[in-house]
Image: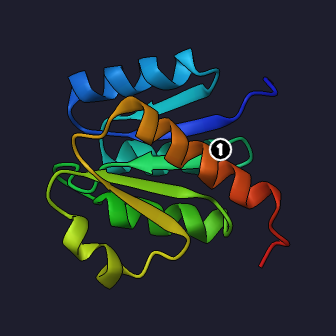
Amino acid sequence: MSSNPTILVVEDEILIRLALVDIFEGAGFVVLEAGDGPEAIKLIDTHADNIGILLTDIRLGEGPCGWDVARHARSQLEDLPIVFVSGDSADDWSEEGIERSVMLAKPVPDAELLAAVRNGLQSTVGSSGR
């Protein structure tokens, strides 16, 4: 497997997801992508050992939402950094109780998105595994 970090990108809007994949592949990440909650959960279940960070939208259509995906990921990867990106769910972030996560409001400039992901990865490298 690659020594580059792996990011799971969960976004139901195909054009946005493709743009995110381009951004992260261009920055040297290995990208796993999911278009909905069930697909994301399946990828987490099969690739948990390789996922270094989760970036997810909140509203993902039918089925599990981004909050649910994040909780499932944390049930397997307790220290996984999570970046939420949403156009309308930022106000719910503190109520949802997903610790050690970041919420960014769409639209997010590419540089800000990359910085949030890199900061999340750096915070786990130096953590003592709480």
Q: Nearer the viewer, residue 129 or 110?
A: 110
Residue 68 located left or right of residue 76: left
Q: Image quarter for residue 108?
A: top left
Residue 82 located left or right of residue 37: right
Q: Does dot 1 land on a helix, a strand or a loop?
A: loop
Q: Residue at x 43, y 40 (%)?
A: 113
Q: Nearer the viewer, residue 85 or 67?
A: 85
The mark tally for this picture is 1
Q: Nearer the viewer, residue 78 or 112?
A: 112
Image x and y of residue 52, in percent: 67, 46
Image x and y of residue 60, in percent: 23, 49
Quadrant containing the C terminus in the rendered view: bottom right
Looking at the image, residue 82 lies above or below residue 129 = above
Residue 119 located left or right of residue 56: right
Q: Residues within 10 Å of mark 1 (few under 14, many from 20)?
A: many
Colouring rule applied to residues: rainbow
Looking at the image, residue 73 lies above or below residue 35 = below
Image x and y of residue 98, in percent: 45, 75
Image x and y of residue 127, in percent: 80, 67
Looking at the image, residue 66 lies above or below residue 28 = below
Quadrant containing the N terminus in the rendered view: top right
Q: Image quarter for residue 63?
A: bottom left
Q: Nearer the viewer, residue 110 or 80?
A: 110
Identify residue for label 1. Answer: 51
Q: Disc 1 marks which amino acid?
A: Ile
Q: Residue at x 65, y 44 (%)?
A: 51
Q: Residue at x 14, y 58 (%)?
A: 88
